[in-house]
Image: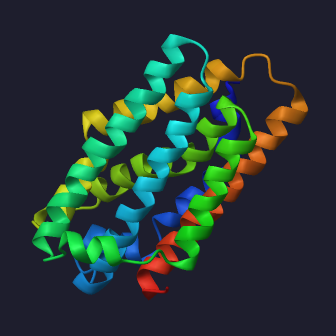
Amino acid sequence: MKVSERLYSKVKDIWESYNLHPFVQGIANGNLPIDKFQFYMIQDHLYLLQYAKVFALGLIKAEKESLMRTFSALIHETLDTENATHQAYLKQLGITREMIDSAKMSLVNESYTNYMISIGFKEGLAEIAVAVLACSWSYKLIGEYVASVPNSKDNEFYRPWIDTYTSEEYIKENDMTIDLVNSLTENYTEEQLENLEKIIVNCSRYEYMFWDMAWNKEM
């Protein structure tokens, strides 16, 4: 069993619960209130900026050029592929740069991103890759689920969000992260693997809290 498969088995139930969350259900059926999505977009934009910093810590710690290029590519994909969708929505929602610059992170968002960054500072490259995998991989699966819901793409407002997380670019980015985890953990001990399980479970729990935070517009 690949390490990524072992990690997936630990969080499969948590990730599947995201599909039942009213926020995700609201995107799938097109009934999510715009004010909740607007709150989410601002918080998710702030999240992505910190998420990119986690990859940047991997870039700094990498010794091999190939790994440096991988982490650099993941930063690029985060800031360009995902962020492009965010920018389009922020503009459509009338959210200005001044509003973004003055926006505060919610407690859940700050706690989650601080946890990932602490992993980046304290631990190694594999741990960094696993810290971001809960978000990356679960969003791919959420995208697949939402796209499978009949008529989900009939809602023109939420269609770009669905298209982003089912796009070839996003799938490629996620696969790159999974491959990175598998390659970096080839010689990991059982103790190290159990630590990776702890990291991905913690991040997966934070992901659910993020959906709750967005649904409740909780600062």
Task: Please tell me whether residue 119 is drawn above or below residue 209 in the rendered image.
Answer: above
Q: In this orientation, does residue 166 appear?
A: no
Kindly indicate the quadrant of the structure image that contains residue 202: bottom right
Query: Left of 209 or right of it: where is 142?
Result: left
Residue 218 image point, x, y percent: 48, 86
Q: Quadrant of the N terminus?
A: top right
Picture colour scheme? rainbow
Task: Please tell me whether residue 24 is drawn above or below residue 106 in the rendered image.
Answer: above
Residue 157 image point, x, y percent: 13, 68
Please name whichever residue, 163 or 183, is drawn nearer the observer in this view of the structure. Answer: 183
Task: Please tell me whether residue 103 is drawn above or below residue 50 in the rendered image.
Answer: below
Kindly indicate the quadrant of the structure image that contains residue 132: top right
Task: Identify the residue at image location x=41%, y=55%.
Answer: 48
Task: Identify the residue at image location x=67%, y=31%.
Answer: 126
Residue 129 image point, x, y percent: 59, 36
Query: Left of 2 or right of it: where is 152?
Result: left
Residue 70 image point, x, y percent: 46, 23
Task: Identify the residue at image location x=57%, y=33%.
Answer: 58
Task: Identify the residue at image location x=50%, y=12%.
Answer: 65
Query: Left of 127 or right of it: where is 177?
Result: left
Kindly indicate the quadrant of the structure image that contains residue 54: top right
Query: Left of 164 or right of it: where is 24?
Result: right
The mark total stands at 0
Q: In this orientation, does residue 187 appear?
A: yes
